Amino acid sequence: MTISGPTRSDAVAAAHGRFDSGQLFEELAARVQRRTVSTDPSLAEETEEYFRADLGPAVQAMGFTWNRFDNPASSTHPFFVAERIEEDAAFTVLMYGHADVQPPQTGQWRDGLDPWTLTVDGDRWYGRGSADNKAQHTINLAALDEVIRLSGGTLGYSVKLLVESGEEAGSPGLSQFCADHREELAADVFLASDGPRMSAETPTVFLGSRGTTLIRLEVDERDRAHHSGNWGGVLSNAGTILAHALASLVDARGRILVDALRPTGIDDAVRRATSTLRVGSDPGDPALTEGWGEPGLSPAERLFAWNTLEILDFLCGDPHQPVGAIPGSAHADLQFRCVVGSTDAEAVVPAIRAHLQAAGLDRVKVVDRGGMTATRLSPEDPWAQLALASLEETTGKAPALVPNLAGTIPNGAFADVLGLPTVWVPHSYPGCAQHAPNEHVLASLTREAMGIMAGLLWDLRSHRP
Ligand SMILES: [Zn+2]
């Protein structure tokens, strides 16, 4: 007779137990209390405390060693790096989270909720940074803790952890830090959690994100406005020129008119993955606009597998006090989002310049206001498939495979700089109010996520890449 050791279901049950006992709530409540607002330099000490008093002791108890590193690009956004190296490890997993949160918006929360006190109301746990990103990395570390315990201290793989503290401030220095610490951060796969699931009910895996470039168009004809009766017809109008420039880039149905900014197609694996995704199906979502965007594509293809060029704002004259004058200058802000394999980040602005020039609109100045690159692991990658099978086994539900987030995360640091296959398993949902008052996580989803992560980290034990 053989005595069998703990099983996968024991690991999932232990993770659920940590939720049911209230331990996970306590862990998260302590972390939400830290006012780690990354856009407020006066709160920089809160981040140091988050590393020193919260994360440090937690990972140390799990057998990690950890270090705090200066950020090469910012004095107030340090990095936390931990590692748990096993001698006979088959491979190394790099995990990630961000310690920082958005400003609290105190006073705007309902019923006087305090952003820094994790508060239960029905299925919701309210608190600033709960969904974005403290619950997400707290779940992952707690699940890992349970798996380490049940496996008798030997996972069969090594784990590294990188926590940044400037994600909500645009991740300053993240790519540079990864490049400078390639050795310390070397791994075989990247596994992390941020952002929302497709819907609260649907376990989700995403493999990268669309890239983004912010662009400003400027028309500067002269330094002031001139009377439209005295000068109309003989002086160029900056507003008219800007309107034509905008209309030449994107048509009245939102279709991009610049060839170099359009993907050449959608590959089969991405098409298959997007075919099961439903867009805008949660209560409170806006109704989708019929016939908007690239013709011939489904809404999921437009959102996850195509590029968009959005006009964010434009200004000439003073719209609040119209006067009969020809504006001398005008400007507009645009945001381009693109999928992997379509337009390189450096090529976006030159393509717009060339397009405007060819249209006779070279008086319009195009300013590159920065952005992030697009990333996407192939949906057929074995790591992605492993995660999907694991989520399905734990939950009994078919998980959504999102090739890339429609929005943008700093995944280029991991996918491009560190060259890792990137697998994201989000634990929040579209209604979580991240970046707004009343940010919360769902208790039911959090409990399920504990099981999901324990199952996944357990399944990695028998994986041999
Ligand atoms: Zn955020």
Image: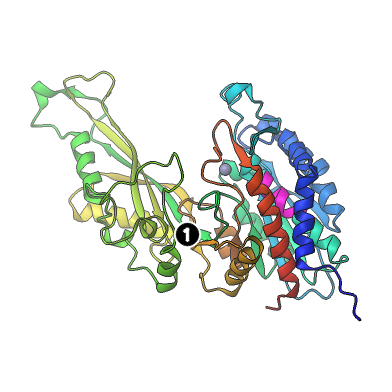
The residue drawn where x is 22% and y is 34% is: 239
Magenta region, residue range = 135-142
Q: Where, by quadrant of the figure, is residue 179 drawn?
A: bottom right
Q: Position of residue 317 (x, y in %)?
A: 26, 26
Which quarter of the image is occupied by the C terminus? bottom right
Where is 318 relative to 102, above or below?
above
The residue drawn where x is 18% and y is 53% is: 359
Q: Which residue is the extreme one toward the front? A: 1
Judge by depth and name the residue closer to the eye, 219 or 257: 257
Q: Position of residue 3 (x, y in %)?
A: 90, 75
Instruction: Quickly name the residue at label 1.
Output: 374
Where is 92 relative to 1, above or below?
above
Quadrant location, ligand no. 1: top right
In the image: residue 301, left or right of residue 384: left
Say whether residue 182 is magenta: no
In the image: residue 149, left or right of residue 248: right
Which quarter of the image is occupied by the N terminus? bottom right
Judge by depth and name the residue closer to the eye, 368 or 122: 122
Say whether residue 138 is magenta: yes
Binning the other alpha carbons within 10 Å of mark 1 as few (below 14), some (14 to 19) or many (20 upward) gives: many
In the image: residue 322, left or right of residue 123: left
Can you see residue 54?
Answer: yes
- What secondary structure prevails in the magenta region? helix
Q: Amino acid at mark 1?
A: Ala
